[in-house]
Image (cartoon, rainbow, N blue to C red):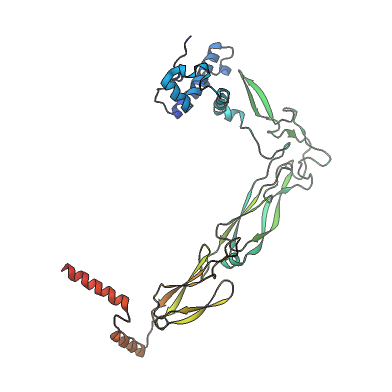
Amino acid sequence: MSKRDFYEVLGVARTANDAELKAAFRKAAMQCHPDRHPGDKQAETRFKELNEAYQHLSDGQKRAAYDRHGHAAFEHGGLNDGFASSMADIFDDLFGDFVGRRGRSGGGAGKERGGDLRYNLDITLEEAFHGKTATIKLPTSVTCEGCAGSGAQPGSKPIACKTCAGHGRVRAQQGFFAIERTCPSCGGRGVTIENPCQLCGGAGRVTRERTLSISVPSGVEDGTRIRLSGEGEAGLRGGASGDLYIFLAVKPHPVFQRDGADLYCRVPISMVRAALGGEFTVRTLDGVDSLVRIPEGVQSGHQLRLRGKGMPVLRSRDFGDLYIQAMVETPQSLTRRQRELLAEFEAESSHKTQPESSGFFAKMKEFFEGLS
């Protein structure tokens, strides 16, 4: 008897995409599954036919070969390697939610790994510069002292589950498939506790407030994450503890702004000092007063660089730089005499004393004269 066309078996067009193939196969397979038709050989044959069609058309390489050569592409064993594994994938896709997924972290009879914890820690820019040791308090699950984490009343211990014989999973026959699922009696742990600990109720852990000392290295940036292995929640029934993640947030500083390892600072400078030049001192985060020299005629926005006066680079001996941005301050609340002096200065100024403004207005005049 010749095989039916795979597209006809699934009831889809040859242009069907992967999602349409999967939907058609799932619908048809559920309708003719042998469990719904016990003893019906036609349903079993139909189910196998659907499996074969979907196994070939869901594989891009096999589908391309089938479109070119039909069933002849798979004769004599061609492109049929991996049929068993593909069938397993198809079955898991269809019934995986029913039987449960394999694998469970924690290891050991009844043991489950504890959850990870997060703690947000605010620090100042000075603390990020120097580093610090912080003490934090957080409520978390710790191993029960009464049962040492086993979950069983002292003097007793967990016993192997009678339903699954300690395996954590049970098998059931579904037609010609053997279905394995999580044991309903022990929840997949493989053990049961007949005499649970009175302190923890059989969980093997209790909630307590813990005090921890956190070492914050110098040079950390906003958003840095510190991982403390094994300092998270205690595991269930003696399972491994989770991890604690410390997320650092650096508070804004009233004077300095940070960009990576570099620091920036805006310093107001009087108009006279900007014109004549001079110097001033600025205290950096290391507590040292550094001398800053102002060149004569400095303009507002000009940056003065202090090498090595920025933030330390994390896990390095290097430092960033400090950039001082000069902000020329316009005088206010002038006396009569000051106004007269400034007016006199303005009258005697030329393009040499104010080259930028003179050049700008000259270009503007030239531009508009060109338009006319």
Q: Quadrant of residue 18?
A: top left
Could you say where residue 108 lies in the image, as x and y percent from the top left?
A: 73, 37
Could you say where residue 301 lies in the image, as x and y percent from the top left?
A: 41, 72
Q: Is residue 305 above or below residue 270?
A: above
* Residue nearer the viewer, 327 or 97: 327
Tell me the residue at 37%/85% (across/down): 334
Could you say where residue 340 lies in the image, as x and y percent from the top left?
A: 32, 89
Q: Quadrant of residue 204?
A: top right
* Residue nearer the viewer, 90 or 187: 90
46 relative to 296 in the view: left or right: right
* Residue nearer the viewer, 214 or 157: 214
Q: Is residue 148 above or below residue 78?
A: below
Instruction: Let me know if residue 23 appears in the view.
Output: no
Quarter containing the C terminus: bottom left
181 relative to 200 in the view: left or right: left
The extreme right residue here reads 155
The extreme left residue here reads 372
Instruction: Let me know if residue 217 appears in the view.
Output: yes
Q: Is residue 330 above or below residue 260?
A: below
Tell me the residue at 44%/18% (across/down): 70
Could you say where residue 129 lies in the image, as x and y percent from the top left?
A: 59, 66
